[in-house]
Image: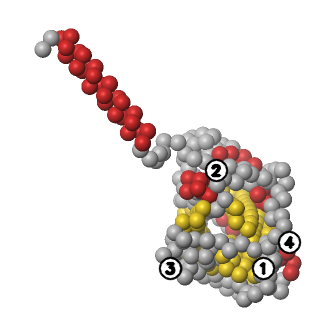
C-alpha cells in the first residue's frame, strides 16, 4: 500500500468518526453540560464568590416574599455548636443567633444535626444560610416564625419534627416566655410578614411541613424538595379565621416528590400563586382549599398517581357553593391523566409589584427548572 493511499484512507476514517460523534452528540439527550437555572438561581449560583458575598442572596427572591431582607444588613454569625438550650442559649448555637434583636446572617462552621429541645423561636431580620455545610434540624421540635418579619431560611434539611412541650422558651435576649407547646410543624409561620424559604428539604413531620397562618403575608416558598409526608402545606388557620384574607404566598420552583398525600398547598381565604412547580405524585389531591381562597396554578407539571380515583389535581373541602371561587389553571402540563377543575370568573393575576414579578415558563419546562430543588452541595470558590 502506498503512503499516499494510506493517508487518504486514514483521512476518510477520521472524517467518518468525527461526523459520527457529532451526530451522536446532536441526538443524545442533553443530560448536562450546562445547568438550566431558574430566575432565582440565576441571580447567584453562577458566581464563584458566593461564599464571600453571601448577603447578595437576599436580592434574589421573586414573588410576594421578594422584600424579605433577612440579615442582609447585619453581621455574619457562625454556628459552631449543635447543642440547644431553650432557656439560656449558649453563644455559638443556632438558637443564640436567631433570638438576637440585631440583624444577623447566620451560617454554619461545619456539618451538623441539630435536635432542638423545644421550638426554635425566630426573631426579625435573620437569615439561616446552610450553604457550604450539611445542616439538619431533625428529631425534635422545629422552627416557629411568630409575630416577626424579614426572615430567610435557605439550604437546610428539616425533617422528623416532633411536637414541642409546654415550658419556657427564650425568643430574645431580654424575654423568656412560657409556651403551650407546638404542633410538630417543620416551619410554622404565624402572624408574620416578608418571609422567604428557599432550597430546603422537608419531610416526615408530625403536623405540616410548612404552615402559613393568622394573616401572615408577603411570603415566597421556592426551590424546596418535599417528600414522604401527609399534610404538606396549610395556608390559613381555619374556616372562621377571616383575618387570613390577608395571606399572599408565592409557591414557585418547588419539587413535590414521592410519598406525599395532600395540601400542596391547601388554602383558606387568601391568595396563592402556584407556579412552575413539579408534582411527582399525590395520594389524595395536590391543590385544595376551603373558605373561598383564590388560587392561580400557572405553568406547573402534574404527574398523576396510578390510582384512577385520584387523577384530579384539585379538591374543594366543601360539597357545594364553590362555583364562584377563583381557581384557575394556565399553561400547566398534565401527565398520566391529571386534570385541574377550574372555577370562578374575572381577573386572577397576582398583581405583583414590579420588583416582585417574574416570567412564568410553560409547564413543559418545569422538570429542568426544578431539577436541583432542595439544599445544594455548594463549595466555596466554585459556582454552586
Q: Earlier in the sequence, mark 2 or mark 1?
A: 2
| Quarter of the image where the N terminus is located | top left
What colouring style does the render use?
secondary structure
- Is 192 displayed left or right of 34 in the figure? right
* Tag 2 residue: 38
Q: Residue at x 19, y 16 (%)?
A: 6
- Could you tell me which residue is drawn at 22 percent across and 20 percent down? 9
Kindly identify which residue carries mark 3.
307
- The residue depicted at 66 percent of the width and 76 percent of the height is 314
Q: Residue 323: give x, y in percent of width and height.
A: 78, 79
Q: Which mark is residue 323?
A: 1
* Residue sitting farthest toward the bottom: 319
* Spot occupied by residue 155 in the image (x, y as percentages of width and height): 61, 58
Q: Label 3's element? A: loop
User: Disc 3 versus disc 1: distance between alpha carbons?
Assistant: 26 Å
Answer with the quarter of the image where residue 273 lies: bottom right
What is the spatial separation of the Cα atoms under label 3 and label 4, in whole angstroms?
Answer: 36 Å
Neighbour tally class for label 3: few under 14, some 14-19, many 20 plus, Cα within 10 Å: few
| Whether label 1 touches label 4, CB < 8 Å | no
- Write down the residue under mark 4: 246
SS category of the residue bearing label 4: helix
Amino acid at each position: 500500500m502506498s503512503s499516499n493511499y494510506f493517508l487518504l484512507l486514514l483521512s476518510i476514517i477520521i472524517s467518518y468518526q468525527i461526523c459520527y460523534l457529532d451526530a451522536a452528540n446532536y441526538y443524545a439527550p442533553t443530560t448536562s453540560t450546562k445547568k438550566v437555572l431558574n430566575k432565582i438561581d440565576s441571580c447567584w449560583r453562577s458566581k464563584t464568590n458566593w461564599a464571600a458575598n453571601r448577603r447578595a442572596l437576599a436580592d434574589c427572591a421573586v414573588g410576594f416574599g421578594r422584600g424579605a431582607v433577612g440579615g442582609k444588613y447585619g453581621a455574619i454569625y457562625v454556628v459552631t455548636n449543635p447543642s440547644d438550650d431553650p432557656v439560656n442559649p449558649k453563644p455559638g448555637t443556632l438558637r443564640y443567633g436567631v433570638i438576637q434583636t440585631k440583624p444577623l446572617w447566620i451560617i454554619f462552621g461545619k456539618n451538623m444535626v441539630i435536635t432542638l429541645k423545644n421550638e426554635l423561636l425566630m426573631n426579625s431580620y435573620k437569615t439561616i444560610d446552610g450553604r457550604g455545610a450539611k445542616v439538619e434540624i431533625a428529631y425534635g421540635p422545629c422552627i416557629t416564625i411568630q409575630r416577626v418579619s424579614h426572615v430567610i431560611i435557605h439550604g437546610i434539611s428539616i425533617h422528623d419534627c416532633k411536637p414541642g412541650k409546654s415550658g419556657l422558651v427564650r425568643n430574645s435576649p431580654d424575654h423568656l416566655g412560657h409556651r403551650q407547646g407546638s404542633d410538630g410543624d417543620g416551619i410554622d409561620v404565624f402572624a408574620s410578614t416578608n418571609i422567604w424559604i428557599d432550597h430546603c428539604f422537608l419531610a416526615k413531620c408530625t403536623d405540616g411541613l410548612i404552615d402559613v397562618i393568622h394573616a401572615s403575608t408577603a411570603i415566597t416558598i421556592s426551590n424546596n424538595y418535599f417528600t414522604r409526608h401527609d399534610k404538606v402545606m396549610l395556608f390559613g388557620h381555619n374556616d372562621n379565621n377571616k383575618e387570613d384574607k390577608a395571606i399572599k404566598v408565592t409557591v414557585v420552583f418547588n419539587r413535590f416528590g414521592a410519598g406525599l398525600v395532600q395540601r400542596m398547598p391547601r388554602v383558606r381565604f387568601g391568595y396563592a400563586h402556584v407556579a412552575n412547580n413539579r408534582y411527582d405524585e399525590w395520594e389524595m389531591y395536590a391543590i385544595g382549599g376551603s373558605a373561598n381562597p383564590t388560587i392561580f396554578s400557572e405553568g406547573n407539571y402534574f404527574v398523576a398517581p396510578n390510582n384512577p380515583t385520584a387523577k384530579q389535581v384539585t379538591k374543594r373541602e366543601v360539597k357545594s357553593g364553590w362555583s364562584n371561587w377563583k381557581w384557575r389553571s394556565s399553561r400547566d402540563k398534565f401527565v398520566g391523566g391529571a386534570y385541574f377543575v377550574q372555577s370562578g370568573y374575572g381577573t386572577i393575576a397576582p398583581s405583583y409589584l414590579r420588583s416582585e414579578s417574574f416570567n412564568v415558563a410553560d409547564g413543559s419546562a418545569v422538570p429542568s427548572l426544578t431539577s436541583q430543588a432542595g439544599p445544594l452541595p455548594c463549595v466555596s470558590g466554585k459556582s454552586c
